Every structure is written in structure tokens, then in C-alpha cells.
Image (tube, rainbow, N blue to C red):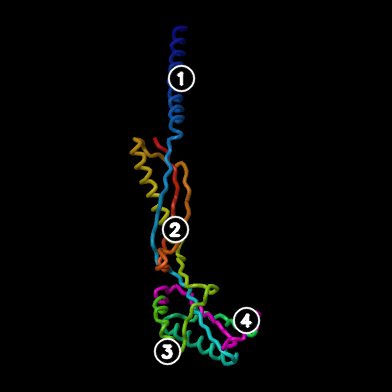
Amino acid sequence: MEKKNRIIEACILAVGLIVLGFCVKGGMDNFTNKDRRVTVKGLAEVEMPADKVTWPIVLKEVGNDLPTLYNRIKTINNTVKEFLTSSGLSESEISINAPQVIDLNAERYGSNDYRYRYNITTVITVTSNKVDLVRTIMDRQGELLKDGIAIVDGGYDTPRTSYEFTAFQEAKSTMMEEAIKNAQVTANQFAESSHSKLGPIVSATQGQFSIEDRDMNTPYIKKLRVVTTITYALN
């Protein structure tokens, strides 16, 4: 009976040693592999046409009689508005700002050597999602010259024509998927070169999205870009 108990105890001890050995091996593997990671960046870029345009139309008139200038500005605004609506824009896409009047007699440091006393600036702003249509109308603005209306450069203090891409959220998820795929491709290449196998994701950052003009000559085409950073484990 005593001999039998010793055999059982020996078996239990052997099993315990085997389990301990596996635990030690697992711990050693985890210790040696804990720093075996690779951090890669995934890039996704796409070009998209702008889906919103803001076009400030700057008009200037000069004269010496304010009532006459007021009627002239009113006529010009109506003519420009009719030109825009007849070209396909709706009245809700057109806003007319109050005119700004400069009285040269009231200028503190001005001289009296001027031909006209009053300088009036009015801005008609077109805000529309019909980007292609607005660009076509911009090309045709010279037609207003036959009515004696010239669209001028408003100077540094007047907003320029701007183009925006507002459907950003719709493109966001697709671009993130592409960035993650590109990051995984790079990580797999690294794993193959290091004779390893790519493990699970340890950490990831969404990265930053940016929207900018493709170039200075085509502001109506936007370049969307996202970079994501992902750390994988290597086995």
C-alpha cells in the first residue's frame, strides 16, 4: 500500500513538473516576444470635385450725387441678379449686401484733388452647390459689360471665390478602410522580411484628415488625405 502511494505521488509530481514546464515556456515566449512589434502608417488619398462654391461679385460706382448713385447701384444689382437667375441660379442662392459708401470729403488725410466725392462698393454673393454651373457663369460675366457693368477686384479686404468639399463624412469611412488596408500590406511585408508572422493589432490611432486644393490653378478640385498609425504584434 505504501509503495502504491509513492507511485501516485510520483505521478502527481511528474504531471506538476510538466505543467510547470509549459508555464515557464509560455512565460519565456511572452517575455521574448513582448517587444516584437511593428508600427506602420497607412495612407489614403483621393481627389474629389468641390460641392460648394461661394462667389462674391464686387461692383463699384463713383459720383458726386448720392441719390443718383443709389439709383444706379439699385439698377446694377437688379441687372446682375437677373443675369444670374436667367443663367440657372435660384434667388435663394443670391444675396445682396448693403452698399458701403466712402465720402472722400470726410477722409482725414485725404486731399481735395479728386474728381468724384463718393465711392460706393456693393457685393452680391452667390452661394451654391451647383459648382459647374457657377464656374460657367463666371466665364460669361463679361456679358455684363454691354450693360455698362464691370465686376472688379475688391482688393485685399474682400473675400475671394472659395470652393469647399462638404460631403466629408460620406468619404471618411471608405478612406479609413483603405488606409488600414495599406497599413496592413506594409506590416505584412515587414513580417515576411523578418521571417515572422503578423499578429493582432496592439494599438491604432485614427490619424488626421486634411482637405486642401489640388493645386493653385484648380481650387475647385480638392485633395482628401488621411494617415493612420497602427502597431501590430509579430509572432
Element carrying mark 4? loop
For mark 1, what is the residue? 16
Give the spatial CA distance, label 4 vs label 1: 101 Å
Q: Mark 4 or 3 closer to N-term?
A: 4
Q: Mark 1 or 3 closer to N-term?
A: 1
Extreme residue in the top direction: 2
For mark 2, what is the residue? 172
Q: Mark 4 or 2 closer to N-term?
A: 4
Residue 118 colored in magenta in the image: yes
Element carrying mark 3? helix
Q: Residues within 10 Å of mark 4 (few under 14, many from 20)?
A: few
Check whether the beta carbons of the residues at disc 4 and disc 2 lie within 8 A of each other: no
Check whether the beta carbons of the residues at disc 3 and disc 2 lie within 8 A of each other: no
Element carrying mark 2? helix
For mark 3, what is the residue? 146
Q: Mark 3 or 2 closer to N-term?
A: 3
Identity of the amino acid at label 1? Gly
